[in-house]
Amino acid sequence: MFCWKSQTMASPSKVVLLACGSYNPVTNMHLRMFEIARDALNKTGRYQVISGIMSPVSDGYKKKDLLPAKHRCEMLKLALRTSDWIKLDQWECSLSSWTQTAHVLRHFRQQLEQQQQQHHGEIFNHVKPSPSKRRKKQQHNIVADLPENQLPSLEDHNENFVPSVKLLCGADLLESFAVPGLWDDEDIEYIVGSHGLVVITRSGSDPQKFIYESDILTKYQENILIVTEWIFNDISSTKVRRALRRGDSVKYLLQDSVIDYIKKHQLYGIPDNKYFNKMMPSPSQDTITTNHLEKDVSFKGGGNLINEVAALEDISSNPSSGEISVILRSAHNNSSGDSSFVSRHLPLHRMITHLDKKGSPAASSHSSPHKVERKGTPSPPVKVTTTFTKDEAPERNHKVSCISDIGTLVRRVKNVRVGFTPETRV
Ligand SMILES: Nc1ncnc2c1ncn2[C@@H]1O[C@H](COP(=O)(O)OP(=O)(O)OP(=O)(O)O)[C@@H](O)[C@H]1O
Ligand SMILES: O=C(O)c1ccc[n+]([C@@H]2O[C@H](COP(=O)([O-])O)[C@@H](O)[C@H]2O)c1
């Protein structure tokens, strides 16, 4: 396997780490992988990691639930604001069809070689490049037109050789080499033989055993560094997507900026507001929570849980006044133990604001119609609760689905903060 100890006194060779993946969405573990790998490589004394590249797969990959590259890249850009050495590169995902990882590695090697040649040409000629040449050089260094795509500048690394590009991956990706028909054998040989692999351990995988069982990998095992991640972290995009779908919090699994982006664009099937409320609960905000499917609701007003088990009779909004009306039946046990219906007055401050005259959400300065803003200032109190007692209760079908009603409502209003318990569905 990989030789950990420095064997020569020669200066360490420069390495660029390339991680290919779906990043659907990018998780904290995708970012951590780079840190773990850089530490491990640098500690060998043989290598010095100079840059990391994240290359999201193209839409042509057609993996289930894969979001368009546009969104995945935006999330990566936001996440990578916290790193000064890992860059997003959009070359791979800008291709219309899926590209093998071996080809992606080859592409980056060529880019670095060309950059090196150019750098050397300039040093050799001792001529200050003309403005047009400088422009050309810039284009050369930048794979696409965004700074996120910039390859490491070789001028910062005064070496005569091109940095090697190593594939950084989790142990699951390594083990996918064995999936029949998935990877070409020549590609595996090229990746491991010509570039090298840095593999981060993942739960349920045994990369050492996997290498032992593979002839190709055993042949090139010198080029494979397995890094055991002792701070066990099994975040995966799949689990994050599942949590989002269910309205569960994903805070501390993703960068906050990525969470905000998902929320803003309502990605991964997050139901309106369901997720939002859980993410940033505020004790001063009023919330409505469904406790059971279909009927029972409890209200939280002014931070105090009124905790009324009540059947939601009707819920409606008045577009012209911007008010919400909630009609509910509330069952209380009176002193004699009998269940009766009582009137409730529930101030649902901040639940709804600003319906425009047409009943659609008021125009926002942001383009997304789905944007839900979190306002620092409270909105005007709204009239709530038409109440009635058991005797007065109108004769009507009580089987109103509060879930669909609330769902309809929240799609029509802004700044509503409605939370559902995880078992509910909109
Ligand atoms: N928790 C983790 N530990 C180690 N490696 C990981 C982890 N999560 C992702 N990776 C690695 O990150 C790379 C990018 O993979 P990808 O975007 O497909 O991530 P994923 O979270 O496994 O996605 P999905 O769950 O959608 O399959 C892969 O090499 C994968 O093995
Ligand atoms: O090159 C290949 O043959 C190949 C086969 C399967 C997967 N990959 C790459 O592996 C990365 C992770 O894929 P996945 O399905 O685990 O999200 C992604 O960048 C794919 O392009 C690459």
Image (spheres, helix red, strand yellow):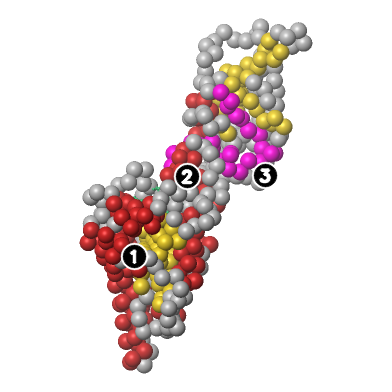
Residue 299 falls left or right of residue 172: right
Secondary structure category for the residue under label 3: loop
Q: Is mark 2 within 8 Å of ligand 1?
A: yes
**Dot placed on the residue nearer the N-terminal end, 3 or 2:** 2
Q: Residue at x 47, y 59 (%)?
A: 228
Residue 58 falls left or right of residue 154: left
Front residue of this view, candidates 396 and 355: 396
Residue under numbered circle 2 = 240
Q: Which residues are magenta?
A: 264-292
Amino acid type at image mark 3: Thr
Amino acid type at image mark 2: Val
Residue under numbered circle 1 = 221
List the single residue furthest toward the bottom.
126
Residue under numbered circle 3 = 377
Front residue of this view, candidates 359 and 283: 283
Spatial separation of the CA atoms under disc 3 and disc 1: 60 Å
Amino acid type at image mark 1: Gln
